[in-house]
Amino acid sequence: MGLTLSQIGEFSFVLAEMGRKEGFLIGQGGDDYYYQLFLAVTTVTMILTPFIIMLAPKISELAESKLPVSPKMKKGLKAVKEQKPEGLNNHLIIVGMGLNGSNLAKAAKRTEIEYLVIESDADLVQKMQARGEPIIFGDASYENVLRHAEIVKAHTLVCVIDNPVATFSIIKTSRKLNPELHIIVRTRYVEDVPDLFNAGANEVVPEEFETSVEIFSRVLNHYLIPFDEINKLTAEIRSDGYGVLRDSSDSLDMEKTKISIPGNEINTVKIVKESSVRGKSLKEMDLRSKYGVTVVAISRSGKAISNPDPDLKFMEGDIVHILGSHKNCACILPLFVGKELPDCNYTPETF
């Protein structure tokens, strides 16, 4: 940074002229020798500035190796290693390597989603690069940084920084460079949501809102409230809070209760009027052999029926407790909520 600021700027000409008039830059013979010398040196530094900026990283590393510099200064002088992303396509770009960005990167790595992180903290970038993290240094609000991250080929960009001004700039620049890009941003307050959508974001997650939703969802789940009712409540709150944001009630994910069964989980679902299983018995549905799940209990009129009889018929209002893998449980959800059953591709060997 010091090298990039080492040139004498244009404003110095004004100061030099004022100094000459006051007699500060007059030579011994009364001429303007020092004034002319100042102008010459200033012009030379301005000509050299582009080359100094280009060579700044190498100059700083050379100074670090040759001069007696303290460890703290060395850390500041050392240039961040530039990484040129290669082979990126349909990838995820994460802006910000804070707590949310770090967790998102871990999730992407575990699910084998190709990703790249953009971070403006040089020390953090160095630390992450040493761990082999796919991360580059830069300000994502600048077009050249986004192009370096191959944003034109990216599938999704997630912005999880705390700077609202930079967030708006990142959204607008990203949308301009890649009109098809899916942009997800985090904001701290619900009132910022409309403006972020207008800037070009596809999804906006207000921090204060989602925290409260997550808390009450977990409380309801702990009380074994059927997941479809939890989703319905969540959808209503989201609709009231920020209208067009993605309605989580469309998701078929089932919330699990705190029961530890390796490879499986127990889920709850409520029988509705439109349910395909209403009026049918466990034997008729044959859920175990067809879909790889087992009904372990049914709550009816406030009473629990454990290990229900195969001839017991499902009734509207029943709360059914189902044991199975997350995939199989999610697959049979439409049977209970009155929707079309998807092709689960279930094979008995996987249960």
Image (cartoon, rainbow, N blue to C red):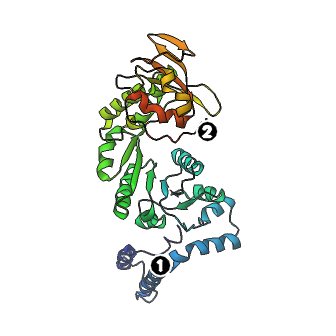
The tag earlier along the polypeptide, 1 or 2, is: 1
> How many C-alpha atoms fall within 10 Å of the one at disc 1: few (<14), some, or many (≥20)?
few
Q: How far apart are marks 1 and 2 (CA)?
A: 64 Å
Q: In this view, does 334 lie to the left or right of 346?
A: left
Give the residue type that dot 1 points to. Pro
Frontmost residue, 226 versus 346: 346
**Three-letter amino acid code at the position of disc 2:** Thr
| Mark toward the viewer: 1 or 2 | 2
Of residue 305 and residue 243, the one placed in the foreground of this image is 305
- Which residue in the structure is indicated by mark 2? 350
The residue shown at (65%, 63%) is 74
Relative vertical location of residue 264 with respect to residue 27 in this rendering, above or below: above
Residue with the mark numbered 1? 50
Q: In terms of image quadrants, where is residue 207?
A: top left
For residue 161, above or below residue 307: below
Residue nearest the observer in this picture, 191 or 201: 201
Determine whether, in the image, residue 271 is placed left or right of residue 256: left
> Between 64 and 238, which is closer to the camera in this rendering?
238
225 relative to 231, above or below: above
Residue 181 percent location from the top left of the image: 39, 57
- Which structural element holds mark 1? helix
Tell me the residue at 54%/57% (across/down).
Answer: 114
